[in-house]
Image (cartoon, rainbow, N blue to C red):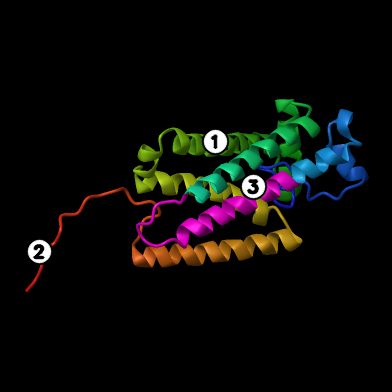
Amino acid sequence: MSSGDNLPLILWSARRPLGRQRSRSLHPAFRNVMPGILLTRWTIRLALALYALYLASRLASAPGERPRPWQRHVWTAACASFLVHLAAAMHFYHGWSHQAAVDDTARQTEALLGVAFGEGIYFSYVFAALWLADVLWWWVGPASYLARGRWLEWGVHAYLFFIAFHGAVVFESGPTRWGGLLVTSILAALVLRRLVARSPLVPAARSHPSSPEHP
């Protein structure tokens, strides 16, 4: 769905309007289940909103500042919301059939890109697994998580953001796309500010020898 509900390569879609066309996209057993549509739609919106909030808060933090407890909770809630979205999409749209998800992704990519690429569903699976692994690492081993190399942290966020951007902007239209572009612009400005300041997002803890006093 998408932030608006149409992230074909990662989040199942709801850019298609409600009604007959929307109903046909649902699994036959759930074509009249409006709560399922709303659950699928709003959980991905919440997930992406919390994801953007987390990134913005970390990028806007002071150089060398460690993540605060509330930021870890936001990151966790964002991931949990996405997993609920994923489960709702598989349940209400595909009846827990992987092949149905592949076929639906192929139809969406063919309609949007002119190429049927059902294997794009695996990007969604990797997205979910990577995000969940990142959250679990932070809770199970916070010391090693915060001391990880900057290349690893940027690599994780680069992939997650790449997929989310395509779902919320490239494959979307209207208010969702404009909202995605606005958020992207804000995040880009914050990234630029950090790069200029040459400050890592989560620097490893280091001990510095005290400098001698000058008379």
Q: Name the residue beneath numbered marker 3.
A: 47
Chief SS of the magenta region: helix
Viewer-proximal residue among 82 and 12: 82
Q: Which mark is residue 132?
A: 1
Q: Position of residue 95 (x, y in %)?
A: 79, 27
Depth check, mark 1 against mark 2: the one in front is 2
Depth check, mark 2 against mark 3: the one in front is 2
Q: Are marks 1 and 3 in contact (CB under 8 Å)?
A: no
Q: Name the residue beneath numbered marker 2.
A: 212
Give the mark nearer the N terminus: 2 vs 3.
3
Q: Are marks 2 and 3 in contact (CB under 8 Å)?
A: no
| Mark 1–mark 2 distance (CA, rounded to whole Å) | 46 Å
Q: Residue at x 40, y 54 (%)?
A: 201
Mark 2 Cα within 10 Å, few/some/many (few <14, many 20+)? few
Q: Residue at x 60, y 62 (%)?
A: 183
**Secondary structure beneath disc 2?**
loop
Q: Is residue 120 left or right of residue 5?
A: left
Identify the magenta region.
Answer: 42-68
Q: Is residue 92 above or below residue 74?
A: above
User: Which residue is outermost to the left?
Assistant: 215
Viewer-proximal residue among 143 and 43: 143
Amino acid identity at mark 1: Leu
